[in-house]
Amino acid sequence: MGDAPDIVVIGGGPAGSTAAAMAAKAGLDVLLLEAGAHPRVHVGESLLPGIIPILEDIGALDAIEAAGFGPKTGSTHRNWGRTPHWDLWFRDSDAFDQAWLVERDRFDAILFEAATRAGARAHQHAAVTALHWTDDHLTGLTWQPRGQPPRTVHPRLVIDASGSRALIAEARDLREPIEGFQHEALWAHWEHTGRLPEPRQHQALFAAEPDHWLWMFPMPDGRASVGVVRLHQPEPHGTSRDYDAAVAASPTMSEVLGPNAKRVTAVRRERDWSYRVRQVAGPGWMAVGDAAGFIDPVLSTGVHLAMHSAWHAATTATALLRDDDPEALTHYASHHRELFEDLLRMVRFYYQQNVHVDDYFWESKRILMRRELTPRPDKAFVILTSGLVQNLALRARDADDDARRRGRSLDATSPSIDDGADPDQLDFVCIHLRHHSERDEHSALYVLIEPRDPARRALARTPNWQVNAIAPRHGSDPVSVPALGPTIRGLTALVERLDTEPSEPLAAFWRRTRVTLVAQVRALAPAFTLVRVFGE
């Protein structure tokens, strides 16, 4: 093994595995060092949809989809603020309808395997024992495989994904506590648990009490993760007795868990003290994930922030090492700071218990307006708390998808299929409508039906298909336009009603449903005229 890899990644958790996989897929020589070994127990089972395009980019999405993790459709809140009971549904983001509630030991192992498949030279039981500096430049490090002599390497760049150990931040005295978030988490796994009633059976549950809050994450086979976050604990000392008492004293948690629920693991304790790192990149190094800062877990942003910062760090490393971009590190640090501050601002507001749910929505809208995004307040909250804001991986995928969908929608050469044509195969179906406004203006609306792809955002998903809408004169979010939104929603609901055959090819779906579909489209409000239905 050479002593000068392009990149050494310290830590094989979600951040380190993501950075290593992305950099290796870009063709860089990557050495990934994990001090422990997989699988390992870790808190943080509740994931956000914002990681989906990142999982696709590192080649792990198929494995996550096949792993049997429980779906997470959003979150249900009890006694949070002055609104006794309210919900967040990921589907209201008009992007993704679910994420997952995972066992972190299996989830982290899948990501580590993805890094190995991508070409990273991955080692477990490989502890970094020293960092080597020349002034402020990180020039090398020493690591030791278990049972073997230490080895010193001199990479072109080090990515610190060492988690809360934050090796570089500690070495350079860069860690700063965030006041007001000295909390303590106690958590364990339970069996034979109940669920929230339909349609909330796949929701993460959060319940607030005066000096703590509780979570319940349902998992397959009647299992659940149950946690207690004790607020304002400058000296963490919670015990299993404190944990059991808090769960038993919560009427909400007792009701949902049910009479047969039983704790089956030891109570684990995590110190949830939030901190920031003043500098997240410098000569020869970058910090990602918890090594670059940690925000209270109340919005489940930990894994998302870890994987997103790692994705960005890997693309930055490629620009820095391959293209010699002198501004790459500055751009990384600036973007990380802005995203971190947006999430921290929302977390601070989220802990205010003297406001109503609409206040959370409006605060989200205020945050997004700083980013020139102006969705309605409730949608702003969902977008922000789903990991979709400033998500560079999603932005890159959206740019590709938008170009592809616009090309399909505006392609006048695609054959019409609303005249009785029976294609043997179809990759998409596009319904072209003309909208007539009160001012006698005409605009085009295209509704696209495509095979379901979990990595791509969609306005709506049915068992087999995903539906999106494009209106060239109305920007990137036509469903938010009052004159168009109800019609778009109605067409997506129609596709959902007609999608009744499992694993049906799109051509077969069209042959089976075309008469009903075209008739319903022709019967739309007078403001809409069917131009044609076409596909390829």
Image (spheres, grey):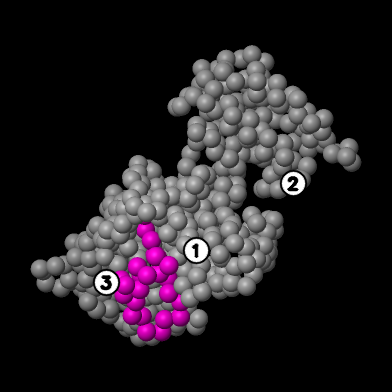
Identify the image quadrant of the C terminus: top right
**Residue at 72% from the left image edge and 40% from the top image edge:** 486
Q: Which of marks 1 and 3 is nearer the N terminus?
A: 3
Q: Which amino acid does label 2 sit on?
A: Val
**Residue 292 vertical position relative to residue 403 in the rendered view, above or below:** below
Q: Which residue lies furthest to the right in this view?
A: 439
Q: Is residue 243 magenta?
A: yes
Using the rendered view, name the quadrant where residue 379 is placed: bottom right
| Res. 2 visible in picture | no
Q: Give the range drawn in magenta.
A: 223-249
C-alpha distance separating marks 2 and 3: 55 Å
Q: Crowding at label 1, few (<14), some or many (≥20) Cα neighbours within 10 Å?
A: many
Q: Residue 154 has which mark?
A: 3
Q: Crowding at label 2, few (<14), some or many (≥20) Cα neighbours within 10 Å?
A: few
In front: mark 2 or mark 1?
A: 1
Q: Residue 481 has which mark?
A: 2
Contact flag, marks 1 and 3 (Cβ < 8 Å): no
Foreground residue among 430 and 345: 345
Q: Give the mark count.
A: 3
In front: mark 2 or mark 3?
A: 2
| Secondary structure state at the residue bearing disc 3 | loop
Q: Earlier in the sequence, mark 2 or mark 1?
A: 1
Give coordinates of residue 365: x percent, y percent.
67, 63
Q: Residue furthest front?
A: 259
Q: Residue 535 has which mark?
A: none
**Residue at 68% from the left image edge and 22% from the top image edge:** 518
Q: Does the magenta stretch include residue 170?
A: no
